[in-house]
Amino acid sequence: MTEHKTLVRVIYADTDAMGVVYHTNYIKWFEVGRCELLRSMGYPYAHMEKEGVMLPVAECGCKYRLPAVYDDLLEITARISEMKGATVTLEYEIRKKETEELLVTGWTKHAITDLKFKPIRLRDKNRQLYDDLKK
């Protein structure tokens, strides 16, 4: 399915008292990857919301393999792994760009809703976006 790579540099504020990236920042970077994936397809979140489509996170998971530290350049890969009814699931990999070491893998599952968080079927609301996500 559709995939996109995004770069992000670790700043001091992303690290904890041990000097490594604080664990919840990886979830934040999943969002960065997801937003940039949609933007690369011509559907930034702001555009989707204007069309009345929201993607609230319903579930997420993360597996930490190796830590990132200050000033690491990270490559976030976001890919759409499943479209089902009124949900879409994305998978993520975060690698250290310089060495290509795999640091974190994870996933998020999103409900597809209208602006009032009522589930909708994307293929009925925006067939072009649905087809693009299914590629």
Image (cartoon, rainbow, N blue to C red):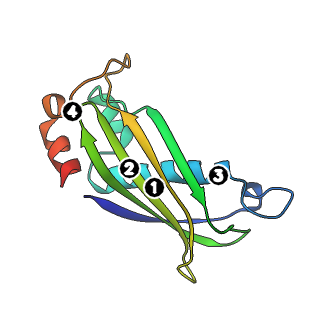
Say above or below: 10 vs 30. Answer: below
Q: Which of the two discs, 3 and 4, labels the residue nearer the N terminus?
A: 3
Q: Which of the two discs, 3 and 2, labels the residue nearer the N terminus?
A: 3
Taking the image as shown, residue 106 lies to the left or right of residue 13, namely left
Taking the image as shown, residue 127 lies to the left or right of residue 88, namely left
On the image, the x and y values in percent for residue 12 come to 77, 61
Report the residue marked by disc 4: 122
Name the residue rendered at 65%, 69% in the picture. Answer: 66
Estimate how packed mark 3 is, as few (under 14), some (14 to 19) or many (20 or more) residues with alpha carbons within 10 Å: some
Picture quadrant of residue 77: bottom left
Report the residue marked by disc 3: 25
Name the residue rendered at 50%, 52% in the picture. Answer: 30
Q: Which of the two discs, 2 and 1, labels the residue nearer the N terminus?
A: 1
Name the residue rendered at 45%, 32% in the picture. Answer: 58
Picture quadrant of residue 120: top left
Name the secondary structure under disc 3. helix
Q: CB atoms at circles 2 and 4 under 8 Å apart?
A: no
**Three-letter residue code for mark 1:** Gly
The residues bearing labels 3 and 4 have C-alpha atoms spaced at a distance of 29 Å
Report the residue marked by disc 2: 90
Name the secondary structure under disc 2. strand
**Which residue, as the protein is rendered here, is positioned at the far right?**
17
Q: Which of the two discs, 1 and 3, labels the residue nearer the N terminus?
A: 3
**Three-letter residue code for mark 3:** Asn
On the image, the x and y values in percent for residue 86 come to 27, 30
Q: CB atoms at circles 2 and 1 under 8 Å apart?
A: yes
On the image, the x and y values in percent for residue 123 come to 15, 34
Report the residue marked by disc 1: 33
Picture quadrant of residue 69: bottom right
Which of discs 2 and 1 lies nearer the camera? The answer is 2
The residues bearing labels 2 and 1 have C-alpha atoms spaced at a distance of 10 Å
Name the secondary structure under disc 1. helix
